[in-house]
Image (cartoon, rainbow, N blue to C red):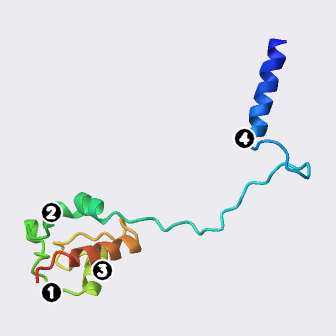
Amino acid sequence: MQKFSLLLLLALIVLACGGGEDAAGEAPMAKKSTKEPAAKEINVKKIWKVRCIACHGLYGDMGTNGAANLQESTRDLDYRINIIANGSENGVMTAFGDILTEEEIKAMAEYTMTFKKE
């Protein structure tokens, strides 16, 4: 009798939580989301700390190993996207095209623009 009561209680819980049939006697279908999946949010500060801070520093002005001072740089966004993706011709800047996505590269280039001092 105790087993039966436990099973009955469990069945009632499942029904109360929507695990039973709908009014037409059919099992409910999983609801499909009408929303598009959100684009992966890019954490530029994390990428900066992992990939860039060693040479450019926290504020873009450290210049280790010949890195450009991003506070003084006059390079435009397209140049920065290219150099992040492909590296510099003289080999000072590492190419990240095989490591970062196109979206991450663009986001990083935009982030480097924020270091510019007016």
Q: What is the three-letter code of the residue carrying label 3?
A: Ile
Camera-side residue: 108 or 29?
29
Q: Which residue is mark 3?
A: 81
Which of the 4 image quarters holds residue 67?
bottom left
Q: Look at the numbered discs 1 and 2 and tell me whether their residues touch, using CB distance below 8 Å.
A: no
Q: Which residue is mark 4?
A: 17
Q: Which residue is mark 2?
A: 58
Is 70 situated above or below 56?
A: below
Q: Look at the numbered discs 4 and 3 and tell me whether their residues touch, using CB distance below 8 Å.
A: no
**Disc 4/disc 3 C-alpha distance (Å):** 51 Å
Instruction: Bin the neighbour count of mark 2 within 10 Å (Cα to Cα): few under 14, some 14-19, many 20 and up.
Output: some
Instruction: Bin the neighbour count of mark 1 within 10 Å (Cα to Cα): few under 14, some 14-19, many 20 and up.
Output: few
Q: Earlier in the sequence, mark 1 or mark 2?
A: 2
Q: Residue at x 36, y 70 (%)?
A: 104
Residue mark closest to the camera, 4 vs 2: 4
Residue mark closest to the camera, 4 vs 3: 4
Report x, y in % for residue 94: 23, 69
Report x, y in % for residue 26: 88, 50
Q: What is the three-letter code of the residue carrying label 1?
A: Thr
Q: Which residue is mark 1?
A: 74
Q: Residue at x 25, y 78 (%)?
A: 83
Q: Look at the numbered discs 4 and 1 and tell me whether their residues touch, using CB distance below 8 Å.
A: no
Which of the 4 image quarters holds residue 33?
bottom right
Which of the 4 image quarters holds residue 85?
bottom left
Is 22 situated above or below 64?
A: above
